[in-house]
């Protein structure tokens, strides 16, 4: 409730600023995220789509901002159970992030995780598992093995392995250690 109240207060504080004002754009994002996290995803989607439209109008040159808007909309669509639409957006966002800032950047790794979650909702567990395994090593190298994002990748990888309804106890994929990618070398020294 506090997050939502702060979201509304932020929006009310900056709504009268000029359309090109960055604080106004940010306040719309804060409101949308607060609505989404407060269990009001339908309203959140409206706010996040408005932010996306504003960003396209006033900051169309800022590809990272455009991708961030689309990522927020995808997360909202997931909350609404619109998994097919979220998957399309997550694929586009992830590809855009890899192309613009590389696959080892923290934001790209996070967007890769979002894509993996969408893949799992779509029942594409093997593709999710492959993506997460590919993201685990860059995350551990760049952020550290104890970083929140790295740990969330571990959790999502576990979900992709064990959440697949087609897996059985005899499935060889379940016998592979989840952290094999990070134990292959000493991440603290960066030695391969």
Image (cartoon, grey):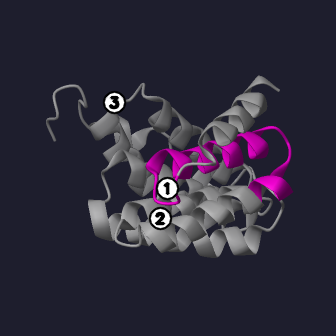
The answer for how far apart the CA atoms under marks 2 and 3 are is 25 Å
Q: Is the magenta stretch mostly helix, strand or loop?
A: helix
Instruction: Report the Cα–Cα distance between label 2 and label 1.
Output: 10 Å
Q: Which of marks 2 and 1 is in front?
A: 2
The residue at which mark 3 appears reads as 144
Which numbered dot is residue 163?
Answer: none
Residue interval drawn in magenta: 18-45
> How far from the left and from the top, in percent, is residue 106?
37, 45
Q: Which residue is drawn at 61% across and 48% down?
A: 16
Whether residue 20 sits left or right of residue 63 in the image: it is right
Mark 2 or 3, nearer chain start: 2
Q: What residue sits 85% from the left and 47% below the top? A: 40
Q: Earlier in the sequence, mark 1 or mark 3?
A: 1
**Which is more toward the observer, 51 or 104?**
51
Quarter of the rendering occupied by the C terminus: top left
Residue at image x 83%, y 62%?
A: 81
Do callouts 2 and 3 mark residues in contact (Cβ within 8 Å)?
A: no
Asked if residue 86 can be seen in this view, the reply is yes
Q: Does the magenta stretch include residue 96?
A: no
Foreground tag (1 vs 3): 1
Quadrant of residue 79 within the rendered picture: bottom right
Q: Name the residue under label 2.
A: 67
Residues at badges 2 and 1 in contact (C-beta under 8 Å)? yes
Tag 2 secondary structure: helix
Residue designated by label 1: 111
């Amino acid at each position: 409730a506090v997050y939502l109240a702060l979201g509304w207060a932020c929006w009310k504080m900056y709504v009268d600023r000029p359309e090109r004002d960055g604080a106004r754009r940010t306040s719309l994002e804060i409101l949308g995220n607060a609505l989404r996290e407060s269990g009001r995803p339908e309203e959140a989607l409206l706010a996040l789509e408005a932010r996306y439209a504003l960003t396209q109008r006033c900051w169309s040159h800022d590809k990272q901002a455009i991708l961030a808007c689309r990522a927020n909309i995808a997360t909202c669509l997931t909350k609404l159970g619109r998994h097919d639409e979220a998957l399309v957006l997550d694929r586009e966002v992830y590809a855009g992030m890899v192309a613009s800032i590389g696959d080892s950047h923290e934001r790209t790794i996070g967007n890769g995780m979002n894509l993996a979650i969408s893949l799992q909702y779509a029942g594409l567990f093997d593709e999710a598992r492959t993506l997460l395994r590919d993201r685990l090593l860059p995350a551990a190298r760049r952020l550290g093995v104890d970083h929140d994002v790295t740990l969330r990748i571990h959790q999502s990888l576990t979900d992709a392995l064990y959440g697949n309804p087609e897996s059985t106890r005899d499935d060889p994929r379940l016998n592979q250690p989840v952290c094999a990618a990070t134990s292959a070398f000493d991440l603290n020294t960066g030695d391969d």
